[in-house]
Amino acid sequence: MSAKGRLEREYLRSQHEDSPMSGTARLARGLLPKLLYAAIVIALWQTAIVVLELKEFLVPSPLAVFNALFSPETAAQYQWWTHIGTTLGEILAAFVFTAVFGFVLALLITWSDIVRGIAMPVIAVFNSLPKIALAPLFLIWFGYGFTANVTIAILVAFFPVVLNTTTGLDDVDEDLLDLVRYLHASKLQVFLKIRIPMSLPYVVSGLKISATLSVVGAIVGEFVASSQGLGFLIKDSQAMMNTPPMFASLILISCIGLGLFAAIAALEKIFMPWNRSPAEGGSR
């Protein structure tokens, strides 16, 4: 094939891959297997209930769980939107705090050896503490409600952002740093032009971990110090051995965590297209 023919073929292929229809097709190919897996899990779940004759107070059927979620009469009894809004607000507040202040603290640690010497031992101590053991203290200090739950979630989710970002800011080729120092680049220029851009994959990785841990922390807080939220609903339903709303709450918690994780991954693809895996990038 001539060089002109190869160029035309590559151009047509790039146009096809970048077209909206191609993007829709890729989304469908990624979504359909997940829906199929979910359908298989639900089918196996229902089959196990029927075959093993499990009682509802042990394991509810999918129909009972969906009835608790979507039946107007039953859903009104559990006040789903109130509990979802409470938990989602706590998770987002904790995640935003950890994302902003975790990144700022990592910058300060990398910028100043004095800050590093002070902050890293404190981070090591707090990161090693079992967070559930601190929850009663937050209950005494902040009382029941939003503040205590967000504080617990922040304590659980904060350190991965700091540690990952610090690692990314430190993980710069020394030869490159020597070169820019030779060119008389200032410390601020090194951070803005080299350290921060090269640390972005580490930052995103820390944010993904923080997103899931924010969910964990918020639910732990609601177990201990809340009268609203999906964690509180699980605890309240446990007292009455009412398993359908417990399973429904777990499904909703998983959806919130997956949604936040997917949002970060989508932003990563938008702002860091060069960081895609070979499977995502496709062949050219």
Image: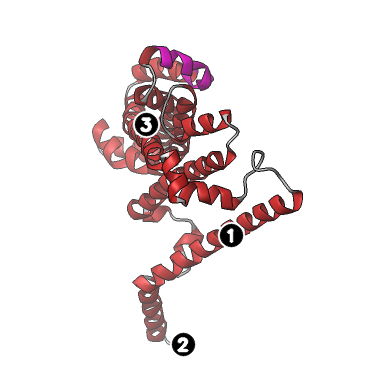
Q: Position of residue 226 (x, y in %)?
A: 42, 25
Q: Which residues are magenta?
A: 125-140
In the displayed structure, does residue 251 sit left or right of residue 263? right
Q: Amino acid at mark 3?
A: Ala
Q: Which mark is residue 94?
A: 3
Question: Residue 220 location in percent, x, y?
Answer: 49, 27
Identify the residue shown where x is 52% and y is 21%.
Answer: 132
Is residue 185 in view from this perspective? no
Q: Say which of marks 3 and 2 sits in front.
A: 3
Query: Which residue is pictured at 53% across the width and 29% down the height?
Result: 235
Which residue type carries mark 2? Met
Farthest-out residue, right: 52
Where residue 107 appears, as percent x and y from the top left, is: 33, 29
- When asked about the image quadrant of residue 147, the answer is top left
Which tag, 3 or 2, sits closer to the chain's start?
A: 2
Residue hosting label 1: 39
The residue carrying pointer 2 sits among few (fewer than 14), some (14 to 19) or many (20 or more) residues within 10 Å by Cα, namely few
**Image disc number at residue 1:** 2
SS for callout 2 = loop
User: Would residue 33 be counted in the magenta stretch?
Assistant: no
User: 69 or 192, which lies in front?
Assistant: 69
